[in-house]
Image (cartoon, grey):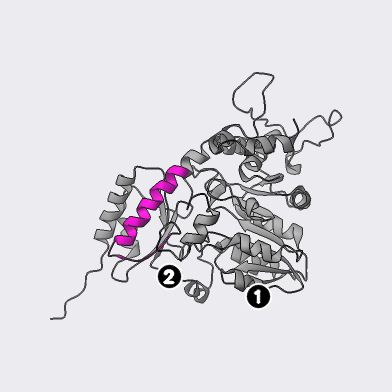
Amino acid sequence: MSKDKQIEELSANGLNTRCVHGGRIEDKTWNSVTSPIIQSTAYRYRETEKRGYPRYFESPNQEIVVNKLCALEKTESGILVSSGMAAISTTILALVKSGDHIIIQQEVYGGTSEFFSEVCRPLGIEFSFVKTSVKSINDAITDRTMMIFLESPTNPTLSVLDIKNLVSLVKDKNIITVIDNTFATPINQNPSQLGVDIIIHSGTKFLSGHSDLCSGVVLGPEMYIAKIKSTARSLGGCLNARDCYLLERSLKTLNLRVNQQTNNAVQLARFLFEHPAVTNVFYPGLQTSVYYSIAKSQMNNFGSMITFQLSDDYNADTLMDNLSLIIPASSLGGVETTVSIPWYASHQKMPEDNKLELGITKQLLRLSTGIENIGDLIDDLSFALSECRLTKQSFG
């Protein structure tokens, strides 16, 4: 069966089936149920057209993971690299050149913003940061715009973009659309079905899901992936066989994990929305969210990331000191619930004025909801919130 036919058939199956069986290879030597770890860095080349070298992204364990992710995201091809930032940087360096122009949403991951400022600018690649709206992005297009880089939902304020509408406006302008789909995951959103060209994930987060692997993936049409692979071979950001194996194992439970995380997030968001210590909850699954309708129309579910603004009468650091189950940690997407303050973590290197413009304050906290029992999470958060109110000094 051809690869395209395999992907087509798997795409028609349920998500759990695709997670478990997508990309699977048969071990005809030992008949094992799981994929073998092919640790070798040297392969006989006279019997095959492939070089079989890991840096060329042709090792078996790399290909297994890519094929599984192609089945989940419904794309033609892909490449697995060593981190989410490796996925982002390699994609951009492969597809744009000096003098080209890129449009980026203001509300993107801090590392992405830093890459454009510190790497693209010295290379002569021009870029514009714009607000998360179709109009703002469309208005920023010039005759040298080669790429639009998107996040939806965004990090950390969870803004949602009307992806299909944007793609329809630029499809005849020879502009490549790229989206970081890390927060949504392939379970909750398939940008390829909305017309996006290239999909990026930080595999370190939900795809791995256990806070123990670092990886990145780029998915899309073969015409783009071939160019990205060519650049990636020179940059050398490949992933070793054992980490590929562990990532494949994690992907088998991706749908189960993300569904549980999302169900927990909906209930945590409702709890936070009603709590007097919280002035705002950023979660597209709340019907009070300005993004609820568009998120419902283009996402399969609303995701497990929640951001909330703590009242000035409460201390964010004290809140985190009083948590027992929820772990203060800078990453996300694991089976355990974590919390961070983006001001000091994901967006620490962003200039203060820029952070404040985006609503990122020292009182803004980002929750990555895990798979624990929801009652335990609510109890933990409720106690921490009750302990973090500032004591007001009496002057009487």
Q: Is residue 273 magenta?
A: yes
Quadrant location, the N terminus: top right
Q: Residue at x 32, y 56 (%)?
A: 271
The number of callouts visible is 2
Residue 177, image x and y in percent? 68, 60
Task: Indicate the quadrant where residue 8 lies.
Answer: top right
Q: Secondary structure at mark 1?
A: helix
Separation of marks 2 and 1 at Cα, in angstroms: 28 Å
Residue 335 visible, this angle: no
Residue carrying label 1: 139
Quadrant housing the C terminus: bottom left
* Residue 342 visible from this viewpoint: yes
Q: Is residue 8 magenta?
A: no
The secondary structure that dominates the magenta segment is helix
**SS state under label 2:** loop
Magenta-colored span:
259-283
Q: Quadrant of residue 392?
A: bottom left
Question: Which residue is found at the position 50% from the left and 71% from the top?
Answer: 358
